[in-house]
Image: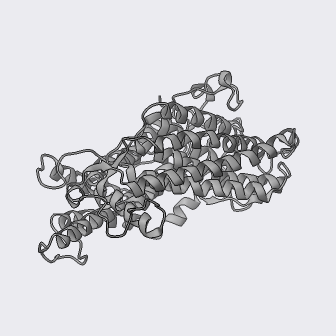
Amino acid sequence: MVLVTDQRLAYADIDSELFEVDQIPMTSRDVRSVGEMLVDVDYLARQLLMDVDGDAAGTLLRSWPTVVAAAEELWTSLPGGRPGVDERDRPMTTLAAQAATIKTSLSGRAAWPGQGPTSPRVDEMTQTFLSAAALVRRYGAEIPHEQPDAHRDLEAARTRIMHGLYLAAHAVTVALHEHGRDRLNDARAAGRGVPLAQHRSPYAIAPTGAWIDRMSACENTAHSYLNDRVAKGLAGEASRPVDDPDRLAQALANWDIQTHRGLARDLQPSNILLIARTQSLIAGASMVLVDAAATAGVLEHSDRLAHAIADAGRSWSNLASRWGDLARPGARTERELARAAAEVRAAYRQITHDETILASPEVIAGRPELPKAARATLHAIQAGSELAAVVAEKAHAPDLTGPARALSRRAHNDVEAGLAGAPLQGNDVVWISPADILARRSVPIPVPVAESLHAASAETCAAACAASAVAALCDAGGGMTPGREQERPRQPPSAGGQHEAWVPSRRTRVPTIGGSRGRTDVRTAGRLP
């Protein structure tokens, strides 16, 4: 799933040096391929499902019709479509009709969920679908969809589209259940009676019960398409070798710039959440690259480096969960920051994954771009210490607020776990007013949450500094083997991995819908501003 042509459409004349101010690749364009966009939609949907709660039910429900409409636009723009409603397209058509009726029901509705903000993560999925659709419309006519490999590649694209919608629909359904659970608990705490639900779930109480039924129908429609199809569909996804060894370095340099630009302003917790999560992802991917580099002899094996990076990754992940409690359901993320994070994810995945699975260290070790990628990821680990210090400063801001329900839960959990040390803390303290929880207000963070946030920030600073020091030693102290990128020959893809049966040569501009981007592929070239 890659739409690409000549790279001159995508990049300016830039150098590949990392963190050199005069040589940083400054581009505001989305440099991902169609396939990488669809993989990122899946990633965003999984993150949404992991973090969903009852307070986000309204924003998710209002966002659902829009993301389905964007997915349908991409679906219908894929080449090889047939006139009329084909059996293959029937689930997408049905899902779009179901979402359209939900949109009609929501418009002008005074009762819950009413009018209000939409979900930023679902909106990002929507924009990604629209960007991919624009690329396909621009270059899709060049795809030889009648060829077997191209046909399988297109089926993989449809599978990814529907799988992203399936995960998003399930996230909305879970949020509706959690919303009903919260309402039920609030009513019981206040001594009010609650009518028994007429559904299989005891939390599908009015008015969420009807919405649960409608979203369950959408979820079942997506499931009907994916049933026994996911593994087979994704197995036909085409992929190409990496043709830009500097991509990861450029992505990490741009990420470093965007994070510091954002942190120089008064960032929302949702943006700091994205920064912490991406730093955790960088640490996790760095462990994979360091292991592969040691296997290839590009980097000396160091248990100390691996442990330091792992500690930093865990600290960033813990810090992200705490900033996530402060993020309001409808809070926006900065567009350039979100785009830079998406490019970092795509650049790492291009090196660390074989089609849909994580590649083994031996496979990654055979990739010619590994030396530059390993050096770039070590530089990113070194830069993480300074970034952690800046994020820690934000934790001490005096005006931090967050959703009342999430902060109440976090405060009681921190006290029970002994993570907060104020002398007046106890399990019987009401840190957040029940009235604020019921009204879903944003409230100042209570003392236990503030103390545990400060402690998590300090822990992240210490772990990031330790990892930075070890990475600097490995990078500057002889750990990196110089010149290996010139010595290392290009290795063929492993058996059962990438296939290029229908790509005659690297000089032939043959478009594909699936796989990694290449400098001569038709689908990496259409870059949207």
Tell me residue 249's x, y (percent): 67, 37
- Which picture quadrant has residue 314? bottom right
Foreground pick, 127 / 84: 127
Please report the residue visible at 70 percent of the width from the left and 39 percent of the height from the top.
243
Q: Is residue 423 above or below residue 100?
A: below
Is residue 41 depicted above or below 260 in this figure? below
Q: Position of residue 81 (x, y in %)?
A: 41, 48
Q: Residue at x 75, y 40 (%)?
A: 372
Question: Can you tell which quarter of the image residue 162 is in?
Answer: bottom left
Q: Please state which of residues 192 and 134 is positioned toward the viewer in this rendering.
A: 192
On screen, residue 286 versus residue 414, left or right, reads right
Is residue 357 depicted above or below 378 in this figure? Answer: below
- Kindly give the residue lying farthest to the front in the view shown: 423
Q: Residue at x 48, y 63 (%)?
A: 419
Residue 189 seen: yes
In the image, residue 154 lies at what x, y percent? 50, 51
In x, y percent, where is residue 124?
Answer: 40, 44
